[in-house]
Amino acid sequence: MVFHVSGLTDIGTVRTSNQDAIDWCLDDASTEALLVLADGMGGYQGGEEASRIALDTLMESLAPALNAGTTPESRKQSVQLALNLASERIEARKAQAPDLAKMGTTIVLAWVSGNSAILAHIGDSRCYLLHNESLQCLTRDDTVVQNMLEDGSIRERDVPNVPFRNVLTRALGASDATATFGEVPLEPGDRLLLCSDGLTGALEENEWISLLSRADSVQTGVQALIDASLEKGAKDNVSVVLLSTN
């Protein structure tokens, strides 16, 4: 399969800085792709630095391995090693500047090769699969509210009223760097979408399908999601990376 990728990040309608960071790369034949999204935390400077350190480290470490004939297991090992290095670099930066002591970042990553993708995430940035006009979230949020949902403390309808609903239980640079991994098979016509919580917080998931279905390219699909989020008054930074297969 051949892949097409596009992405955008926007400051949103309220924030004064953008602490999200995105990047992606394709091999020369566009048959293997690496997609990365990070959402920083820890104040204006801290969040921006943490997400950028993580993103740059992952791209630097993993992009050269595209189309190197690696197996899914070896790709997972490479991703974890890169995450460990990113965590070390964030910790080193925090040691240099006490005012950055609370900085950290979410990470969601997709390494797509052939007819499957390996996924890795830490935090609440998500990966979705759009298959046959059906949208499926492939990641689990590392948040207090997700734990509460799973242990029955609250119901889905209660989530908007939980004051600490965005508190993370895990983040790169603020906890163990071990990622949660997954693997998903892909078919021609499938799309993978990485996003920060700025998108999920502004736009209902059931609106995504119609917007993406009307898009004639990954570029217009990404732009449509960002524009719709801003029209809804996105209070957080909004970031999307979208891959299509054919």
Image (cartoon, rainbow, N blue to C red):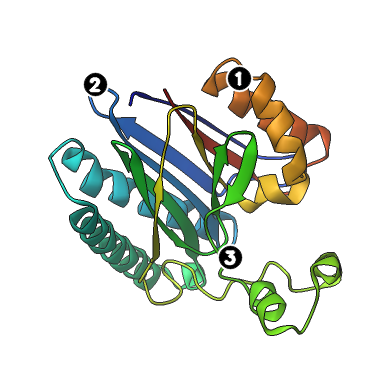
The amino acid on which the numbered mark 3 sits, given as a three-letter code, is Asp
Q: Which residue is mark 3?
A: 141
Q: Residues within 10 Å of mark 3 (few under 14, many from 20)?
A: some
Q: Nearer the viewer, residue 134 or 215?
A: 134
The amino acid on which the numbered mark 1 sits, given as a three-letter code, is Thr
Question: In the rendered view of the protein, which quadrant contains the C terminus?
Answer: top left
Q: Which residue is mark 2?
A: 29
Q: At 48% across and 61% down in the image, what residue appears?
A: 105
- Compared with 121, 71 (above or below) is above
Q: Are marks 1 and 3 in contact (CB under 8 Å)?
A: no
Q: Which residue is mark 1?
A: 220
Q: Are marks 2 and 1 in contact (CB under 8 Å)?
A: no
Q: At 43% across and 66% down in the image, what residue appears?
A: 172
Q: At 60% across and 19% down in the image, what residue appears?
A: 220
On screen, residue 20 versus residue 15, left or right, reads left
On screen, residue 128 versus residue 66, left or right, reads right
Task: Tell me which label, 3 or 2, sits earlier in the chain.
Answer: 2
Q: Nearer the viewer, residue 224 or 8?
A: 224
Question: In the rendered view of the protein, which quadrant contains the N terminus?
Answer: top left
Q: At 71% across and 27% down in the image, what residue appears?
A: 211
- Compared with 175, 112 (above or below) is above
Residue at mark 1 to residue at mark 3: CA–CA distance? 27 Å
Say which element carries label 1: helix
Residue 149 in the image: x percent, y percent? 71, 76
